[in-house]
Amino acid sequence: MITSLLVIATILYLALQLEDKLSFPSPLGLISLSFLANFLFQETPILHGDTEHFAELVLFLLPILLIADSMELKVSDLKKHGLSLFYLAVVAVALSVVLAIFTADWIFGQYHLSVAAIVVLFAMVLATDPVSVVSVFSKFNLPHQLKILAEGESLFNDATALIIFVFVGLYALDGGEITVSYVSQVSLVVVAGSALFGCMIGLIGIAALKTTENRIAEMMMLIITGYGAFELSEHFYTLLNIFGSHSHMHLSGILSCIFATITIHHLMTRNVEKDDENLDLEEQNLQKEADLEHTSPRKIASVLDHIRIRIEERERHMRTKEDVQLLALVANTILFVAMAGIVDLSLLWHYKMEILSMFVATTLIRALMMAKFALITNQTTHMTNVNFRWWGVLTFAGIKGGLSVVMLMMIPAGFEHLEMFTAVVIGVVMLSTFVYSGILILIIALNKDSFDREVQAEAEEH
């Protein structure tokens, strides 16, 4: 275990050094170094496990990644770009699955996949990884609105893909009948219920936060809120049964965790903003008192004490956010090391044509969905206009991640195409991590001057 800890810490250190010194995105560095470490430590694996244990590890670490990413979103941005994010994270994913149903025979014709199997397969490879997107963007000067669209889409996209996978794909694979009424009802109940439940947990979390001034305790409560929302949503039917309602209703843990974190972060941020306003008033009062001929030392001490308390509270909130981001970075490192350990290269090579075909198909589908989004935004005043540069960024911001492997583990063990699905999903995750990240960096680098002008225009507008 100590060796594993040393290797993981070393990989993270080197990946961060590569990012700082060479602007090499940390996800690429982490996964490259993880494969190198697993090759060097073949006799003594860094992390023991298989795909099933990897899926459990992802579920264990996923909430902290969601918490860290959700803290980057502001309610004001969600209100302003809500329509755009709804299209990107919900409509585009649903349309992609529909398009896949009509085109899958061209790729997997020899397997004679059912509609349910196609939905299951494509839902897995449509789920994106917000951690990779945020990591790439953090090193570049990009327009705030573009970052919100890409990062927000990658965050909410996971929830949509998982809902389609579980409530449509697996449901149909198990013999359930898919109707428009069923899909509409499930979508409304799961999405609205998860969002509402997450907000409620967030309000409970902020109430608990007000009982402490300890930074570590504050961070623990933030983690408890996010993990609590995730776990309670996944077992929502158990809560209902406890209260005497014999229901099998499920909610989305991802959505609930996101909304719980956004709620608690919004209220924390609002408190900080109020403190900033109060600080200005306190400073004015202090200046007035200092200007008086006969000042009151007691009053000045009281004002200074209020200023100190508010500054400490603001710094505590900021450091809590940094602590959560550090935990998320460590969690992401562990995931990449674990993923490198479960990859079966011989299996990937055996299904190389299926992997490449799926990778190309999903890339083209995503490019088409982003092109349609750009067309829509340029015809309405209710959405931010998307130009060609932004289209390229949005297209290749669709890097896949660990959630795809989690969904893979949910497929029944007796499913006849499970081996092929496993190879395709892991292969597409690997390819997207390297290829998409590389193209994304290239697009941003080639259009640096244009993006700088757009950033400057945003600053002048505000």
Image (spheres, rainbow, N blue to C red):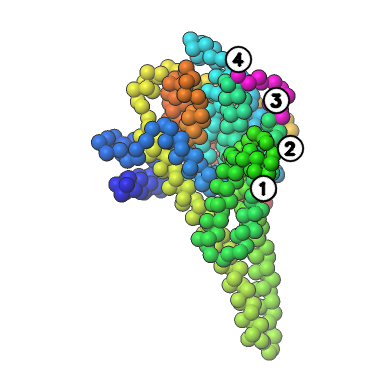
Separation of marks 4 and 3 at Cα, in angstroms: 21 Å
Separation of marks 2 and 4 at Cα, in angstroms: 31 Å
Q: Residue 114 at x, y = what percent?
A: 56, 15
Q: Residue 260 at x, y = what percent?
A: 62, 48
- Dot placed on the residue nearer the N-terminal end, 4 or 3: 4
Label 2 or label 4, whichever lies nearer to me, is 4
- Dot placed on the residue nearer the N-terminal end, 1 or 4: 4
Look at label 2 and name its amino acid: His
Separation of marks 1 and 2 at Cα, in angstroms: 26 Å
Label 2 or label 3, whichever lies nearer to me, is 3
Q: Is residue 312 magenta?
A: no
The quarter of the picture where residue 96 lies is top right
Label 4 or label 3, whichever lies nearer to me, is 3
* Left-right relation of 271 to 406: right
- Dot placed on the residue nearer the N-terminal end, 3 or 1: 3
Look at label 1 and name its amino acid: Cys
Q: Residue 304 at x, y = what percent?
A: 61, 77
Mark 2: which secondary structure? loop
Q: Specify the label residue 182 is tagged with.
A: 3
Q: Specify the label residue 382 is tagged with.
A: 2
Residue on which the image places disc 4: 102
Q: What residue range appears in magenta? A: 175-185
- Dot placed on the residue nearer the N-terminal end, 1 or 2: 1
Look at label 4 and name its amino acid: Phe
Residue on which the image places disc 1: 199
The quarter of the picture where residue 348 lies is top left
Q: Is residue 323 visible?
A: yes
Asked whether 292 or 451 is in front, the reply is 292
Residue at the far right: name it: 381
